[in-house]
Amino acid sequence: EPEVTQTPSHQVTQMGQEVILRCVPISNHLYFYWYRQILGQKVEFLVSFYNNEISEKSEIFDDQFSVERPDGSNFTLKIRSTKLEDSAMYFCASSEGLVTYEQYFGPGTRLTVT
Amino acid sequence: RKEVEQDPGPFNVPEGATVAFNCTYSNSASQSFFWYRQDCRKEPKLLMSVYSSGNEDGRFTAQLNRASQYISLLIRDSKLSDSATYLCVVNIGRRSSNYQLIWGAGTKLIIKP
């Protein structure tokens, strides 16, 4: 069964450093998403991406965040200058169609900023 | 009012019991509704989409009341493997915001043998 994959599973970085989280969505999916979940809190939408551009982003997704699909398979989330409060689990998801379609989630990357 | 509000939990129930989860949402324009399940430190997984007419999948029944902006999930004959956090998810409902899902905080379910 096809699945969304994410690397690394755990990333530790120092405050102020840049990190890139990587995702490989399911191959025939057209819509891609990033979410984050701070430990013990709810899942929060960050951004959606379709047709090589951002479709929508939340208030959390400020100028220090960016997304890219550098080739036909990878979908990345970059955090330019990490803060302590960026520590969270970051989930990538993909779907065949718009929001009424099931979003398939990857296993997540746990980001720890020290 | 929170955009998506769920019972705070946790629910501790014996195996075989029936469990009901409740969820309310604030945006009357929301069109898509889902129940996800999340195991500890794992990714969310779709359990059911919720349709206006209500829908059932084995031991699971989901219902939607648009007038009351209320969604429910019923689990019958609960199993130990049902232990997880159940997340109510709603699309934001603004015309320009079809892509964005709003997540409830989740209700943790613990099934006891």
Image: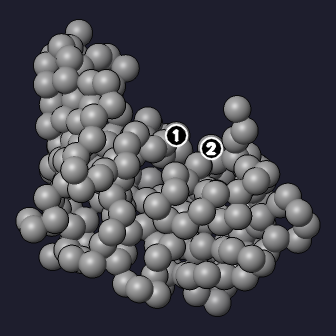
Residue at (31%, 24%) from the top-left corner? B58
Q: Can residue B90 be seen in this view?
A: yes
Q: Name the residue under label 2.
A: A107
Helix or strand or loop: what does disc 1 sit on?
loop
Do the numbered discs 2 and 1 sit on residues whose CB atoms are within 8 Å? yes
C-alpha distance separating marks 2 and 1:
6 Å
Which of the image's four quarters has the C terminus of chain A?
bottom right
Residue at (71%, 57%) from the top-left corner? A29
Front in this rendered view, residue B52 or B59 = B52
Q: In this view, does B53 lie to the left or right of A31?
A: left
Residue B38 quadrant: top left
**Residue A32: x and y, percent?**
66, 65
Residue B21 quadrant: top left
Q: Residue under mark 2: which chain is it in?
A: A
Residue A34 quadrant: bottom right
Q: Residue under mark 1: which chain is it in?
A: B
Mark 1 is surrounded, within 10 Å at the Cα level, by few (under 14), some (14 to 19) or many (20 or more) other residues, namely some
- Could you tell me the amino acid type at mark 1? Lys
Residue at (30%, 72%) from the top-left corner? B30
Which disc, if any, is residue B42?
Answer: 1
**Residue B95: x and y, percent?**
41, 86
- Same chain, marks 2 and 1? no
**Residue B13: x and y, percent?**
15, 23
- Could you tell me the amino acid type at mark 2? Pro
Q: In this view, does A88 lie to the left or right of B2?
A: right
Q: Examine the rendered structure and indicate whether residue B2 appears above or below residue B88.
A: below
Helix or strand or loop: what does disc 2 sit on?
loop
Which disc, if any, is residue A52?
Answer: none
Which of the image's four quarters has the N terminus of chain A?
top right
Q: Can residue B108 be seen in this view?
A: no
**Residue A26: x and y, percent?**
73, 50
Residue at (64%, 47%) from the top-left corner? A106
